[in-house]
Image (cartoon, helix red, strand yellow):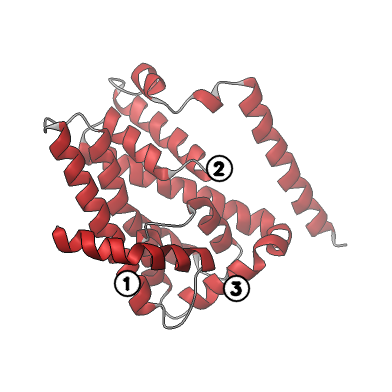
């Protein structure tokens, strides 16, 4: 076995062990919630914003749903700033987990995710930027898994990161709106957020069916979109 493979494997194991140790010996596991936002982020100016961005990136990198970060961004800041910081935090998390997989996990992750990475490569081959945007618009799928699969695929980081940045925007706006204290009647705010979510999800599902050209990103994603297709069509028709 090559020394480089051994070093990468050891680095992977040590980094995971270090992450586990940090979570056990600190309050990181309980940090991202509204009480923490009130104590450390709201009213703390640029320092609070930077801390939110750092923690949001870290937690999305290890699997916390980016929608939760978007919700807390709307809660802590205005809709506009909350959306911006929520998108940047999700992008930072994507960059961290993507880079982690590309630097350390190609050999180790390929045994588990190789088939998915191959499908991802075929799916984005001709238009990597556009297809990445499409993947991020979908209302189903696992953000962390997508980052890891992309990391062991052949996609160029710039295409994946900029495509993710654009594709993250609609859902981030929706959840920042839900979390915000904007002076709109709660029922109206919720209805607006649901409407925007349905529209963005229907757009992603429609684009996926139209432009995948026979390729499948994931069997579970295909099944979920098939099940959701009728309800999305009905909902968007009413809207």
Sequence-wise, the earlier of marks 3 and 2 is 2
Cβ–Cβ below 8 Å for labels 1 and 2?
no
Discs 1/3, front:
1
Q: Position of residue 237 (x, y in %)?
A: 16, 64
Residue indicated by mark 3: 118
Determine which residue is flagged by label 1: 207
Query: Could you tell me how far apart the alpha carbons at marks 1 and 3 are, in whole angstroms?
Result: 21 Å
Examine the image and state in which quarter residue 25 appears.
top right
- Which class describes the residues within 10 Å of circle 3: few (<14), some (14-19), or many (20+)? some
Q: Judge left or right: residue 52 versus residue 83.
A: right
In the current view of this chain or complex, which residue is farthest to the top?
A: 39
Image quarter in which the N terminus is found: bottom right
Q: Report whether 102 appears left or right of 1.
A: left
Residue at x 16%, y 36% (from the top left corner): 187
Residue farthest bottom in this picture: 213
Q: Is residue 230 visible?
A: yes
The 10 Å Cα crowd at callout 2, few under 14, some 14 to 19, many 20 or more, is: some
Q: How many labels does the image show?
A: 3
Residue that mark 2 sits on: 62
Q: Nearer the viewer, residue 160 or 204?
A: 204
Q: In this view, does 143 lie above or below 206?
A: above
Task: Give the image location of residue 174, x and y in percent.
Answer: 26, 46
- Find numbered disc 2 in the image and state the secondary structure of the residue it sits on: loop
Establish if 162 lies above or below 216: above
**Residue, x 55% and y 27% (percent of image)?**
29
Q: Nearer the viewer, mark 1 or mark 2?
A: 1
Residue at 37% in and 61% down: 138
């Amino acid at each position: 076995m090559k020394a480089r493979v051994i070093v990468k494997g050891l680095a992977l194991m040590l980094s995971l062990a270090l992450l586990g140790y940090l979570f056990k010996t600190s309050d990181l596991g309980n940090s991202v919630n509204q009480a923490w936002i009130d104590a450390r982020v709201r009213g703390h100016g640029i320092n609070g914003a930077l801390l939110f961005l750092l923690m949001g990136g870290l937690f999305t990198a290890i699997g916390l749903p980016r929608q939760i970060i978007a919700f807390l961004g709307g809660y802590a800041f205005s809709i506009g700033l909350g959306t911006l910081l929520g998108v940047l935090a999700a992008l930072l998390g994507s960059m961290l987990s993507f880079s982690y997989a590309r630097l350390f996990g190609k050999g180790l992750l390929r045994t588990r995710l190789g088939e998915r990475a191959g499908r991802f490569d075929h799916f984005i081959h001709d238009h990597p930027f556009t297809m990445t945007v499409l993947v991020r618009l979908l209302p189903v799928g696992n953000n962390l898994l997508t980052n890891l699969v992309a990391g062991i695929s052949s996609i160029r980081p710039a295409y994946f990161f900029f495509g993710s940045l654009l594709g993250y925007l609609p859902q981030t706006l929706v959840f920042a709106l839900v979390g915000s204290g904007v002076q709109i009647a709660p029922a109206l705010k919720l209805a607006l957020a649901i409407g925007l979510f349905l529209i963005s999800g229907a757009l992603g599902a429609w684009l996926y069916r139209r432009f995948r050209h026979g390729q499948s990103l994931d069997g579970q994603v295909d099944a979920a979109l098939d099940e959701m297709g009728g309800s999305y069509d009905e909902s968007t028709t009413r809207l």
